[in-house]
Amino acid sequence: MSDNPKYSMVVPIFNEAENVDRLLEEVIPAMEGLDGPFEVIAVDDGSTDSTYEKLKILRQKEPRLKIIRFRGNFGQTAAFSAGFAQALGETIITIDADLQNDPADIPALVAKMNEGYDIVSGWRYDRQDKFISRKLPSMIANKIISWTTKVHLHDYGCSLKVFHRDVVKNIDLYGEMHRFIPAVASWMGVKVAEVKVNHRPRTAGVSKYGIDRTIRVILDLITVKFLLSYSTSPIQIFGLLGLLSGSAGFFLALWLSFQKMVLGTPLSNRPALLLAVLLILVGVQLISIGLLAEMMSRTYHESQGKPIYVIKDILE
Ligand code: UDP
Ligand code: MG
């Protein structure tokens, strides 16, 4: 193993003891079909079954398999993040460990990548999951994500994706955010393509998620949208809302003052007065939050030396 791998596969694994043998059986030939050396990084996300022991046995026969073992269950996004940090390859491939994704699709995704894309995302056009609890919420979520992030994909939740190394090394992931990598990465101007992939029903082990994931995804979407649009200028959104609210309150208060002082109408039984006060206060608060967020954004970028841009090439 003198060569540095050209391809790094990252697989998050949580309690998939029944699947890891078959996973390797399918993944290794698919990776061998690529045009360069590869590594497979299995991230054991705190499994409590025999997943880790099984992986260790597999590694004895397959030195290209690397294992990262978490101390506890930190979640799929954290597992991806740990795998990305270790990945040596130029091209990073992600896949689920439960074999719902078909490793045989990998060469087609990589071929698409070589046409000049930075991200190629799998699209499970014939998804084999329950309709009410999985497919319907994800159909709705996909539409909302596509509309808000302006990165148009049919299927954000598909784990089978291929990334250029620069993409995963330039983004930070939190919460349930792995599905938003294409959207998060869009700030640095990536070219994204989508390829239809095979999807199979889970045959062993159990799904780790239920319908509650939809809510977490929507909340993370709000974060992603905010960070994408306003992270370097939060006053633009908070200030705008604050100005709208504050000026509405101001004009309402002006009108009420005119009624009281010029027309002599008593204000004691006027709920509009309460509304005016509320609008003004909310306006002041929103603008203050915007200013605080501006300072925090500067602290965030400057203290960590984070640039607000990503350079592709410099020609001198
Ligand atoms: N997974 C993980 N940590 C978790 C939950 C899931 O690493 O806390 C892994 C899991 O082992 C699988 C992948 O993430 O490889 C997707 O999980 P699952 O198949 O349960 O999700 P679904 O396909 O039902 O959306
Ligand atoms: Mg699955």
Image (cartoon, rainbow, N blue to C red):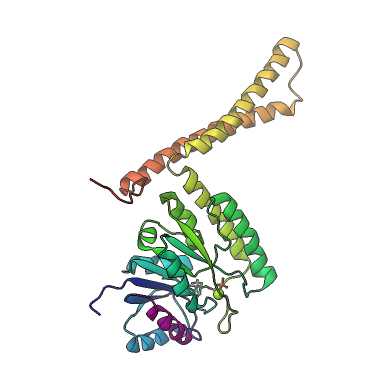
Question: The N terminus appears in which quarter of the rendering?
Answer: bottom left
Q: Furthest residue to the front?
A: 115
Q: Nearer the viewer, residue 285 or 68?
A: 68
Q: How many marks?
A: 0
Residue at (35%, 75%) from the top-left corner? 35
Q: Which residues are magenta?
A: 21-35
Tell me where residue 305 appears, x and y as whole percent: 30, 48
Q: Is residue 285 above or below residue 71?
A: above
Magenta highlight on residue 22: yes
Asked if the magenta segment contains residue 243, the reply would be no
Picture quarter containing residue 268? top right
| 215 relative to 34 in the view: left or right | right
Q: Quadrant of the C terminus?
A: top left
Q: From where the camera sits, is residue 45 visible?
A: no
- Magenta stretch: dominant SS? helix
Check the image and report above or below for 264 versus 123. above
Residue 127 drawn at (x, y percent): 62, 72
User: Quick check: 205 left or right of 299?
Assistant: right
